[in-house]
Amino acid sequence: MVTGTLPRPPADLATVAPGTGRTRPALPRAALRVSLAAALAVVAVATLSPEGTGWAWGSPLVELRWYATGLDSGATLLQLVGNLVLLVVPAVLLVVLHPALGRFRPLLATMLATGAGIELLQYALPVGRVVSPMDAALNALGATAAGVLVARLRRARAHDLR
C-alpha cells in the first residue's frame, strides 16, 4: 500500500458524500440493526395497541370496495396510505442489512409473512382490531415497492462507485 492512500470501502459499505464524489463509511451495521428493532417496535405499537376487546373480520372484497369507492374521503385515504407505508422503514432497513432481500420475490414473501403475522397477532390478542387480509397485502405491497426501489438505487450507486 502506498503511504497516504486508503483502500476504497466496498460499495455496499460506503456512501457518496453529497457534492464531493468521495466515499464515506455507511451507517454501521449495529446502528442499522437497532434502527430496525426500533422501527419494528413502532409497527408493533401502531398495530397491536388495544382499541377494545376481541376482533372483527375485514372481508377483503368489502374492504376493496370501500377503498375503491372512498378515495374522496380523508379517512379512507389515511387508511390506504397508512397500510401502504406501515412496513416501508423495516423493509428498507432489511434490504440495506441483507442485500439478498432486495429482489422482488424474496422481499415480497418476507413482507407478506410480516403483514400476515401482524394480522394473526391481532386475531390472537384481545386488542379489538379488525383482522384484514387486505391490510396485510397493502402492507406487503408498499414495503416491497420501497425495498426494491432502494435496492436498485444502491446497486446503481455501487456500480457508479466502481
Image (spheres, rainbow, N blue to C red):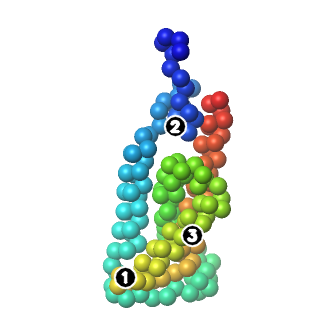
Q: Residues within 10 Å of mark 1 (few under 14, many from 20)?
A: some
Q: Which residue is mark 1?
A: 125
Amino acid type at circle 3 is Leu
- Residue 38, position as x, y percentages in the image: 37, 57
Which quadrant is home to the C terminus?
Answer: top right
Decide: marks 1, 3 in contact (CB < 8 A)? Answer: no
Q: Is residue 128 left or right of residue 76?
A: left
Determine the residue positioned at 42% across, 55% down. 36
Decide: marks 1, 2 in contact (CB < 8 A)? Answer: no
In the rendered image, the vertical position of residue 56 relative to residue 41, given as above or below: below
The picture quadrant where one finds residue 22 is: top right
Q: Residues within 10 Å of mark 3 (few under 14, many from 20)?
A: many
**Is any atom of residue 141 visible in this view?**
no
Q: Which element carries disc 1, helix, strand or loop?
A: loop
Numbered badge on residue 112: 3
Determine the residue positioned at 57% across, 49% down. 99
Gap in angstroms between the C-alphas marked 1 and 3: 20 Å
Numbered badge on residue 13: 2
